[in-house]
Each structure stands twice: as structure tokens, then as C-alpha cells.
Image (tube, coloured by chain):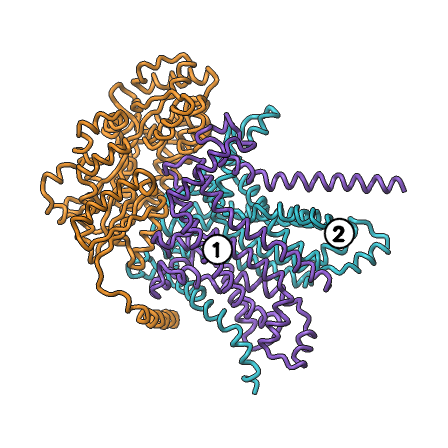
Chain colours: A cyan, B purple, C orange
Amino acid sequence: MPLRRLLPHYLMIAPFMILFAVFFLYPILSGLYYSFHAWNGVTKPEYLGFANYQKIVLSRDFATAMRNLLTYVAITVPLGVLVALGLALLVDSFVGRWANFFRNAYFMPVVLPAFLAATIWRWIYAPNFGLLNMIIGWFGAQSINFLNDTGTMLYALIAVDVWVSAGFNMIIILAGLKEIPAELYEAARLDGANKRQQIVHITIPMLGPVLFFVVTYGLISAMQVFDKPWLLTGSSFTSYGGRRNALLFPVMDMMGRAFGGVRFGEAAAYGFLLTLAIVLLTAAMFGLRRLKGWA
Amino acid sequence: MTAQFSRISVWTVLKWALALVVTAIALFPIWWMINVVFSLPGEPVSINPRLWPTSIPAGVEKIRLIFTETDYLHAYCISLLYALLTIAGVLLIGSLAAFEFALFEFPGRGLLFGVVMLSLMVPTAVTIIPTYLLTSQLGWLNTMRGLVVPGLASAFGLFMLVQFMRAVPKDMIEAARLDGASHVQIYWHVALPLCRNALVTLAILTFMQTWGNYMWPLIVGTKPAIYTVGQVVGLFNSPLSHQTVDMVMTANLLAAIPPLLFFLIFQRKIVEGIAMSGTKG
Amino acid sequence: MSTLSKFRFGLAGLAALAAIGTAGRAAAEDVTLQYWVYSDFGEGDALRLQQEFIKEFTAKHPGVTIDIVAKGDDDLTAGQVAGAASGNLPDVFMNAQSVGAQLVEVRALDNIYSKWMAMPESFRAQFDQDALKGCMPKPDELYCLPYTGFGSLLFRNLTVLEKAGVDTSKPPATWDEWFAQMKKVKDAGMYAIPDETLVFNSIAEIYATSGSTESWGFDWANKKTKIDPAIMAKVLKKFVDMKPLSSGTSRNDQATKDLFISNQLAFHTVGPWVNPTYEEAAKASGLKYDFTLIPGDEPGKTGGIRSYEMVGVAPGPHADLAFEFAAYLTEKAQMARWAKLLSRYNANAAAMADPEVAALPLIKVSVDAAHGAMDVAAPYFGGSVPSCYNSEVIDMASATADGQHTPEEGAKELVSQLNDCLAQ
């Protein structure tokens, strides 16, 4: 009897779970297996124990990549979500076709393929006569080589990243804004709360679950950043990371070790180290959520 | 009274100014790219900063060249089919599973969902070679199913749909059940319509993600017959290509048009969906 | 571990079942060869000539079809590595000699030595001996046929130089003369040269003004770099000197070409592939430029690098036919037509000596450039170059140019870091 009651549930998740097991779980587990082996994709894997992991952690590039990653994540995620929240509130304050227009305009960069965004921004950042340097030039300042000056490279990447991701998060936050019951604002207004107070005391707390989603997903994807820095630095499998590795990130190093050095076992080990970091970070987020009692 | 009136208008002016500045920041790079396409080839940026289109015929000629010299149209069809099949699969399979995970209790629910969520945290670079080897063993290299099927169980899609489905009121489901609706009917007639906006949003995101996907089509589809737009554009983007930057930009611009159109067409659906859930709240 | 392997075994069985389902269509058919080329071979005139080669070859081999497939640089490598892993390699393919070691490691490249030796002497003698050596890590191992290639050139913007008061009738004969011209250009308010420290190849180009193949590249037996710290110190000093004169853009940036075309940049050291762009600009906007050899420290010595693309053959049932096709492509008659069409240098010395080919100005300079140049990453096929190698070189060159080390310290530090990197 209970089985008959439960069967429909399992049948409904079966297509997803089967495809997931075959095309995600199996590759992940076999990746885990290879991470303990020396493997070039062709010859028989050779068991190494933790040697791949050890080699990666001890390599100089690992420290650089992790330092870059932490700085990047610590800035780009909060900044991206703040900008998105600001944009969502801004769009929400308009009505009718202008609300539509602004929302669509802000979403446009999200729609561009990453290689296109990178190509455009490489030009905007170009030294001396790039668009940005032209504007800087009007104010009589020295030209900045944004993508080759180790002091600016990371921020140049973050700007592109926010430019692209803000629209994406804005759409999700907008959907969340629409879910907030109008009566709450009505009540607050009767209590004499002004716009700012309404945002702080109603909007933000009510957006809790949505913001949690946006931040968590933003963290997970920022930790796996790859294509934008790869393209902005004009990287290839044999040489990547930009000047002085200022834009070297773990996934870039993984791809280089995999396809540039045909060391797939090592690349897989790198991937699981990164996974571990992401899992810990996400667990911390969920712990924080429980602590604060959101959603 | 007057003080309040003027405060409102100051706020309004600021609001409009801010909204327009952000519009400029968001759209200018795209506008600039269009100008690069519609300008004479080989004109250095330092002479012509491309603030507006300077030569429409030159741009048309570039587009014509790309369509005649490469299999761009064919790649368009492949990419479109790839994206649409993926969307159909992701929405169907994902919403079936999300319906269960979000609204029902059954043994193993937490564990299964947890495992799927964990997979979100494993970088694709780990799995790409094993997935590729599996696809090759299935004999699916250079086929549409090889492109589509491995990406259907989207953990991100499931995550998103579950978030939205949680908002479906439990009493509506109970009411439908009391009316004699079957499990599948509840899914189809109650849950799906209620999260239509989430489905449309997921469709758009899946379209963009599939359209921009580069590495997977590259290794699975090695024959030009199954080249996606990304791969054709990749030929232009390679560093030693003979192409000038104008041609590269044109190829890129053409690649950006379908996702832009797809978004502009379906954004109304999002508005509807959002408005619907708004009145419901 | 055992449950895991059981799991993998189970899935392999599942895969096998599925494979049986689709096996029926692999009926006995005529042979189709997959031929992968760089993207610039797959467009315009180059593609049309390649297709002509294919047509001629298949006309002599009934039942053979050859599909030409163009891919970008990294995509070629990724596709070949993945193809090797799954047993779906292209039959004949191009790539750079510098990734040859990896391709041999994953068994993508067949040792074609015996097939090569079976070819007539008249064919074997056509190839440039240095280029051929690049494909032969050992006397009885040949992993590729050298195909196209380049020696780097010095492109000069004559308008800029004249405006700076430089006599353009004679190209600079030595580094000192060249550097003096750069300074004049800067004094006249224009950029002398791209920032040569940004890209590995441009660093190598400048290194070659003082060093040579003997003091560059790898000692694979001892896992050490062959870079001589004394020469490197001298070269790093040059980067320090050039820093204030440079445009800040790299040798490969589109921006650099733009500066050159718009008469703001005097020199551009790069391969001949930029020439079509400059030629077009000469027609469209009256750009006045020429190309010459990169001067070395002493008169008669040239800087710059050389590198060859290879065509390789995958092991497998069609390996013989694939080799035959590769040999046909690289033969004198085809390579001479290729050179005439594109004005591009290649590794077939006999074709380069063809009077009609040798008369082409770009080829004439390229032949001299390639002979005097330094191999960019030799010896090939000895080992796969770790990615830290190139980035260490770039990092140290730029750090020294930025004034973070003296050239002497930088050179010493670099050599020890490169040895660490290779030893990893």
C-alpha cells in the first residue's frame, strides 16, 4: 500500500534522476577515481594516492589562483547583488512601458554570449585609445592599461562581471519583489514609514529567500569563474592567467592542466579541491540562513 | 504641500537620470559593437571611435560575406535545434522532478535532492572528459542527441524550479486531490500554470546557456555538419585568423541576435507571469 | 574503490548495449578521411586551394573522400586530445610542433619514419632540414611533416620614421641602430614599439637579437632551461630600455595593428600574417610600410623566431592513406602553389627556391628571416612544456621592465624558476 502511494513520486523524478545519474553522477564519480591516478585520457590510469592533490596544493600557482579567487568572490558577489537589488528597486519604481523598457535594457548584457562580451570589453579597456582611456584622457589623466596592469586587472574583470550578472540577478529579485503583498506596504505607510524605512523593514526582509538564492548561486558560479578572465587575458592552453597570473583562477588552471598538459587526473584532483571549497562555503551560507532563520 | 511636491519631483528627476545612465552603461557597449560592424573595414579606432554607424553598406557587405563564406546559416539551425530541444527537455524533466521535491514527502527525498545540489558545486572541467567518453561509447559523437541529452538533467533548473514550486499553496493541491485529480493532473493543471513565470525564465536562461556553450559542442561535434554558431564564431576569434576585427565583430554580432530576439519575444510572457503571481499574493 | 569500479563496469555494459543498437549502420563503405586544419586554412582563397589539393588527390584515389575541417588553435588541440581519448581522431591534422609531445603522449601521432623512408629521396630532399629536425626527436622517429611556418619580421611604418627624422632607406643593421631609431620616434611624440614583454613570442623575438637556439629552449634530459643568464640579463636590460618607448599594447593585439595603421607606431615585430591587413590599409588609407629582418646585436645577426606548423597522421586503419595524403600536401608542387597564392613561407625548401616563389618580396625576406631566427620552443617532442614556463618568462620580463628587479637579478632568478618549473 505505501509503495503504491509512493510509486508516482518516484516515477515523476525518474527521468531526471536517471539522466542525472548517467550524465552527471557517473562522470563525477569517475572524475573522483581519476583524481587519484596519473591519467592522460588514453593510457591506463596509474594509481598515485593523494599525489595529485599534494602536487596541486604545493604548486605556486595554486596559492595565486586561490588568492585571486577569494578577492574576486569577496568583491564581485556582494557588489553584483547590491547593484542588482538597486536596479530591481529602480525598475520597480517605474510602471508600464518604462518599467518594461528599463528592465529589458538592463537585462540585455546577460543575453550576450561570453566571448562577445569579452571581445567588446577588451576594446573598451585597450590602452591609450580604448573607450575608457579616451574618457580618462578628457580629464587629462594618464592612460591605464587595465588588462595588463596587475593593480587593475582584477577590478577590470569584476566590472565586466557585474555588467553581465546584474541584469540576471535583477530579474530574479524583481520576481521576488512582485511577490511581496501590497498590504504590508499599506500598513507601513499608515504607520508613517517613509520609502527608505519601507525598503529596510519590509522589502529586504521579505526578499530574504530570493536574496539567499541569488547570493548562494552567485557564490557557486563565481567560484567556478572561467570564460571571462580566460578571454579577457587572451589565454590559451599553453599560456594563461594574464600578466603575473593576476587573472589566474582555479578552473583556468584545471583546463590548462587537462588540455594543455594532458594530465586529466591532476585536473580532476584540482576540481575536487575546488569543489571542497565551494561545498564549505555553501554550507556556511546555509548555516547562516538557519542561524538567522530566513525562509 | 509645495515642499512635498518639490521633493517628489527631485526624487523623480534623480530616478530618471539614474535609470537613463544605467541604460547607457548597459547598452553602450552593444551599440558600439554594432557601430564597429557598420563602418569601413580597417579604419583604426583612433581615427574613427565608432560612436555611431559610419557605413551601412560596409556592414551589409560584411554580413553578406559571412553568410556566403561560412556555413553560418546551417550553424544557426543546429544551434537553434540544440537550444530548443534542450529547453523542452530541461523544462519537462526538471519540472516533473521539482514538483515532487518541492511539494511532497517521500523516503530518500532529502538525500536525492542533496546529491543533485552537490553536483552544482563540481566544476564542469572535472566531468567534461568522463561525460565525453561516455557519450562516445554510446556512439553519440557528432549527433544531436550527443549534444542535447547529457545536459538535460540540469541541477540549476531543478534548484530554481523547486524554489518557485515551494510557493504553490498546499491547500490548492489538497483541494484538487479531493476533486479527484490524479497526481499527474495536479502537476499539469495546478503546479505548472502557477510557476509559469519561473518556467519562462528558466527557458530563457537555458536558451542563453546552450547558445553560449562552447566546450561541449567543440569536443562532441567535430564535424562541420554539426557545428554550432559558437564554433563557427570560434574560427573568426582564433588569434591568427586572417580576419580583421570588423569581420570578427560581425560574426559575433550575428551570434548574439537569436538570444536577443528570444528574450525580447518572450519577455512579455515573463511580465504576464510576474503580474499573475503578483495579484495572487 | 571496488564498488566504484563495479559501478563503472555496469555503466560500460549499459553503453555497450546501446552501442549494439546503433552498430548496424557501420557498413563497409568507401574511405572518408578527416583532415583538420587551422582556421585560416578554412576560409577564402586558402580554403579553395586546399579543396583543389583534395580534389586532385581523390581523383587519383577512387573511393576516397576527404573532409576538410577548420578549427581555431586551442580547439585543434582540445579536439585532438579528446579524440585520442575516445578513439575518434582525425586522420590527418595540423597543429604546432610545440604541442607535439602531448599528442605523442596520447598516441594521436603515428611514427611515420618507415613510411617516410619508403618515399623517394627526391621527395625527402625537398624539406627544410631544420624544420624536419623539429619532427624527429630521435634518428628513427618522425612524428610529423613540417608544413607551413614563419620567421618573424620587423614591420616598419615609414611615415612615422620619416616624421621622426629617421633615414628609412636602410633598415637598421644592429640593435643599437634600431634602438636609437626607437628613441627618435618617442622624442617625436609617437610610439616606437609594442610592449614586447607581454607575449612569450615577442620576448623570444627580442631574446634572439642576442641569443640563439643554443641558448634558448629546453634541455629535456636534465629538465633544465637552456636560457643563458648572461644573455637574459642583456635582453632584460633591453626591455627596461624599451619600456618608456612602448605603446603598452602587445604584439598580438588588434590595437597594435590599429596604431601602426594610423601612423602612431613605428615598429611591429610579428609574423607575416599581419601583412594582408597592412597591405589593405596601404590601399585604403595610404599606409606606407615595409618589412625587413629584425636586427641583432652584431651586423649580420638577426633576431626573431621561427616556428613551423606540422601535419601529422593518426595511427589506425587508414594511416597509410593518410600519410600519402599528408605527403601529397607537403610536396613541392602543392607548397609552391600555396606560397604563390598567399605569399607565405613554408617548410618545403624546394618550393621556396622556385624562381617564381622566391621573387615574392614577403617570401624572400621570410626565407632569410627563418634562416637567421631562433626556434621558439625547441627541441620539440622531448616533453610537454608546463604552462608555468611561458608565464614565468613573461612575468619576469614584465617585472624587470617595471623595475622590480635589476636585469642581472631578474635573469638569475628567472633561470632558477624555470628549472624549478621544468623539474615539477
Check the picture and name the quadrant holding the N terminus of chain C: bottom left
Instruction: Give residue A216's mark.
Output: none
Closer to the camera in the image, A22 or A285:
A22
Q: Secondary structure at mark 2?
A: helix
Q: Position of residue C336 (x, y in %)?
A: 20, 34
Chain under callout 1: B
* Residue A173: image location, x then y, percent: 66, 54
Residue furthest to the bottom: A1
Check disc 1 and report the residue beneath it. B210
Could you say which is closer to the camera, residue B78 or residue C398?
A: B78
Residue at image mark 2: A199
Residue B1 place in picture, x, y as percent: 90, 42
The amino acid beneath tag 2 is Ile
A196 versus B132 height, above or below: above
Q: Residue at x 55, y 55 (%)?
A: B205
Mark-to-mark CA distance, 1 and 2: 36 Å
| Other-residue count near label 1 (Cα within 10 Å), few / some / many at <14 / 14–19 / ≥20 | many
